[in-house]
Image: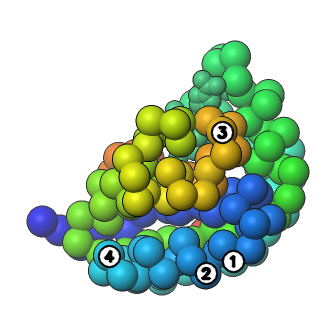
Amino acid sequence: MAVERTLSIIKPDAVAKNVIGEIISRFEKAGLKVVEARMQQLSQAEAEGFYAVHKERPFFNDLVKFMISGPVFIQVLEGENAIAKNRELMGATDPKKADAGTIRADFADSIDANAVHGSDAADTAANEIAYFFKK
Ligand code: RTP
Ligand code: MG
């Protein structure tokens, strides 16, 4: 297993619930390290660009509207197998299907307001990190 970096976003619903710390604590306890981070209010263009891969999907407009509904906490997590580990900690996209003890099972209200984003593969992780943390 290799040390990887992945992009994590704590979405507006979880920021509004005041659980940024609890969510970061789960990453840290699982051995992931926060190596970059900031709070940000996304613009419509930033949210559309970030989720551009979904732009033909029926949920795209709602997804963008939700992602700009309040500030988000954007971070880069680093550690062994970070991409898959983060997805495991997050749980399934739909919190009703997420395993008990996952972030989405514990903090998400719906498939739209689902608390966190995590990169899903090595190439998307690299692209998403570059999107928000340009060197
Ligand atoms: P994310 O990108 O936010 O980490 O979520 P994900 O990989 O688990 O799910 P993805 O398929 O990439 O979808 C991105 C976000 O779009 C919303 N969605 N709604 N109504 C629907 O069928 C539906 N499907 C996806 C979710 O909020 C999901 O997080
Ligand atoms: Mg995704």
Q: Earlier in the sequence, mark 4 or mark 1?
A: 4
Question: In which quarter of the view is residue 115 placed?
Answer: bottom right
Residue 107, x across and y down, in percent: 60, 58
Residue 100, x across and y down, in percent: 40, 52
Q: Residue at x 65, y 39 (%)?
A: 110
Q: Earlier in the sequence, mark 2 or mark 1?
A: 2
Question: Are the residues at dot 2 and dot 1 in contact (C-beta closer than 8 Å)?
Answer: no
At label 2, the amino acid type is Gly
At label 1, the amino acid type is Arg
64 or 92: nearer the viewer: 92
- The residue singled out by tag 2 in the image is 21
Question: Are the residues at dot 4 and dot 3 in contact (C-beta closer than 8 Å)?
Answer: no
Q: Earlier in the sequence, mark 4 or mark 3?
A: 4
Q: Quadrant of the N terminus?
A: bottom left
At label 3, the amino acid type is Ser
Question: Are the residues at dot 1 and dot 3 in contact (C-beta closer than 8 Å)?
Answer: no
Label 2 Cα crowd, 10 Å radius (few <14 / some 14-19 / many 20+): few
- The mark lying in front, picked from 2 and 1, is 2
- The residue singled out by tag 3 in the image is 110
Residue 34, x across and y down, in percent: 48, 81
Q: Earlier in the sequence, mark 3 or mark 2?
A: 2
The residues bearing labels 1 and 3 have C-alpha atoms spaced at a distance of 25 Å
- The residue singled out by tag 4 in the image is 30
Is 39 situated left or right of 2 in this image? right
Question: In which quarter of the view is residue 44 placed?
Answer: top right
Q: Residue at x 69, y 62 (%)?
A: 14
The residues bearing labels 2 and 1 have C-alpha atoms spaced at a distance of 13 Å
